[in-house]
Image: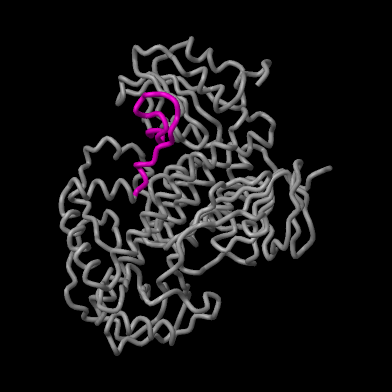
Amino acid sequence: MSHDADVVVAGGGPVGLMLACELALADVTVVVLERLTEVDTTIKAGAINSPSAEALYRRGMLPALMEVQRAAAERFSSFMRQRQAAGASGIKAAPRFAGHFAGIMLRGDLLDESDPDLGTSGPAAELGLIPQEALERVLAARAAELGVSLRRGVTVTGLDADDEGVDVHTSQGSLRTGWLVGCDGGRSTVRRLAGFPFPGTDPGITGHQALVEMTGSEALGAGWNWTKTGTYVHGPMPGRILTVEFDGPPKDRDAPITAEELQTSLRRVSGVPDVTITEVHTATRFTDNARQVPDYRSGRVLLAGDAAHVHSPFGGQGLNLGLGDAMNLGWKLAATVKGRAPEGLLDTYTAERHPIGAWVLEWTRAQVALMRPESHAQALREVIAELTGTPDATTFFVKKISGVWQRYDLPGDHPLTGRSAPDLELSDGTRLADRLHGGRALLLDLADDPDLRKRADGYDGRVAVHTAACPDRPGLAALLVRPDGTTAWAADTGDAPDGLDAALHRWFGAPDGTAV
């Protein structure tokens, strides 16, 4: 039976678009179905972490995103100017921001910059302040350049999967595809239709986040604030507010959000009776429902992003977790579509991503517990705040929040194996990330070793080979980097290339001309 597309992606947010771009780089035909007719302007995540920044940088999107970040930084400066003009008290220069845990600020001046896990991202390290809406626009433009078919205003209504593919039924007809990936959010239609179990913990909070016009805001504290009735955030851009109340989940997640509802919540949590919301630009409700599917794949149907795991939004982990899913899945699914995947390759998607998703659920649950407006949580906040006043604790929390701790359990004992590849500066004037723009794996020969390069014979089109020295890392001889930027194998100067053949076979199958 013929297919309308190799892969159909349900959901055209950042995760679905990132996945579609990865597939298109491998010449896989992709159709993205998005129920919204325009880019979602609802206020959501405001930043990306290190793995996300590295992934986007490795695909050549750094210049466009640096422009996005400059605009976001100007909005932050505008917020501070507005507060000063309004006569807000207590405004002073803040220490360099390095993230937060449950609203407890982490000071960049306490960070141990010598930690070996830090400082390996190259120019991507400068990228962070990227609002989700702007990222979606950049990815949509990139997907269009790559020939991805993005169909807006289309709702998935049903699916029938068999051993050869999936019939996807939509509000505009049906499509036959080899594979279906649900990137359609926390209330995923694909997850429900395909029958994925979704165990976890029930919600207990009601949160609001919005961009508004308001008066009386000079009486609000800037940043994160804890009160006897909840938690609220003011800033870091003009009109941005966030409230958290701990008296149960929203009664109706889908009801329109009014200025009165936001104002009532803000007044109740902040204790400022005169703050008045006059206009709502964008608003959303959220809660701390925390669930995860046990397996991200069921036959020809897969899940990524919030479709596979949901949790509270504190720390902005959801967007980053989903982008990591897309990077991990993209090249593996492409190899499967093209018939060149070694046995079990697609199963490593769940094996590698599920533990990181489970950690994020626990990390966000801990933050909700710390924010509760009761004496035990307050005491624990004071302990954590005291700890984060030390370089060791600050470095620990920053490494967790930034994602640099992430490592896949891969064969091999080199310290780089399983980790995101360092952005090496090479003697030919390029960097390692420059060699990953096309989405292929990379065997980087840093010691000009013909025998090493010969081992990649037969992997043309799957593994690019590049020879150059790296003066900053004279002890490093070679790296095999997967398309998602993960180091699959590494060797130091003087080491025999043991394990390279096995790594090539494990991730990319047999060389051309031999059986897989």
Q: Which residue is drawn at 82% across and 43% down?
A: 2
Q: How is the image coloured?
A: one colour
Q: In this view, does 382 lie above or below 452?
A: below
Quarter of the image where the N terminus is located: top right
Q: Quadrant of residue 361?
A: bottom left
Instruction: Give yes or no for residue 415 being in the magenta stretch.
Output: yes
Residue 308: percent from left, percent from top: 54, 53
Q: In this view, does 216 lie above or below 323?
A: below
Front-most of residues 281 and 205? 205
Q: Give the range drawn in magenta.
A: 402-423
Residue closest to the far bottom: 274
Q: Which residue is drawn at 78% across and 48% down?
A: 4
Residue 321: percent from left, percent from top: 46, 51
Instruction: Give yes or no for residue 304 being in the magenta stretch.
Output: no
Please indicate whether residue 359 sits to the left or right of residue 99 in the image.
right
* Magenta segment, prevailing SS (helix, strand or loop): loop
Residue 93: percent from left, percent from top: 18, 64
Tell how many labels: 0
Quarter of the image where the C terminus is located: top right
Residue 263: percent from left, percent from top: 38, 84
Residue closest to the far top: 451
Please indicate whether residue 260 sits to the left or right of residue 305 in the image.
left
Front-most of residues 472 and 81? 472
Q: Which residue is drawn at 30% across and 66% down?
A: 77
Q: In this view, does 429 lie above or below 158?
A: above
Please indicate whether residue 348 sits to the left or right of residue 153 in the image.
left
Front-most of residues 433 and 456? 456
Q: Which residue is drawn at 44% across and 12% down?
A: 449
Residue closest to the far right: 1
Front-most of residues 349 and 316? 349
